[in-house]
Amino acid sequence: MWRKYNQVMTALNIFKWIGELFTEYLFLPFDFLRNDADMNWWLANGINWLFVLIGFVLLAYWMGQAVKFKREGTEDKA
């Protein structure tokens, strides 16, 4: 019985550790940016602009590849 209890507690501790890792350490830059939003709106939203820029670049690449495959006649029409 104690062995099963220890296995369950180990699994719970792993998930608690993962949660603590993200909330206490990996999100620190985002906490800084959130608290800095009153001072500099552009800095606080810079990560959002970066994601939008990456999305547009990937969309342009995807559309370019679609046009290339359609022009060659190798487009998958399934």
Image (cartoon, rainbow, N blue to C red):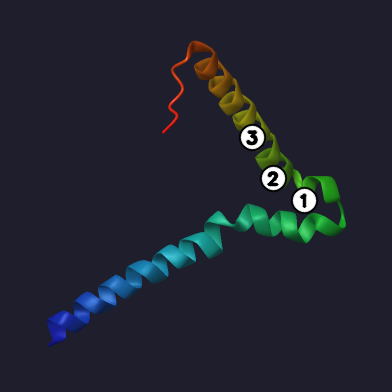
The residue tagged 1 is 44
Q: Earlier in the sequence, mark 2 or mark 3?
A: 2
On the image, the x and y values in percent for residue 78 come to 41, 33
Label 1, label 3: how far apart the Cα atoms are = 18 Å
Q: Position of residue 64 (x, y in %)?
A: 59, 20
Q: Residue at x 64, y 52 (%)?
A: 29
**Which numbered disc, 1 or 3, marks the residue closer to the eye?**
3
Can you identify the residue that label 3 sits on? 54
Q: Write the residue at 66% across / 41% down.
A: 51
Which residue is identified by label 2?
47
Q: Is residue 74 above or below residue 38?
A: above
On screen, residue 4 above or below 11: below
Q: Earlier in the sequence, mark 1 or mark 3?
A: 1
Q: Give the residue type that dot 3 points to.
A: Ile
| Badge 2 element | helix
Which image quadrant for residue 54? top right
Q: Amino acid at mark 1?
A: Ala
Q: Residues within 10 Å of mark 1 (few under 14, many from 20)?
A: some
Answer few, some or many: residues within 10 Å of disc 2's Cα (few below 14, many 20 plus, some between 14 and 19): few
* Residue 30, picture quadrant: bottom right
User: Which amino acid is tagged 2?
Assistant: Ile
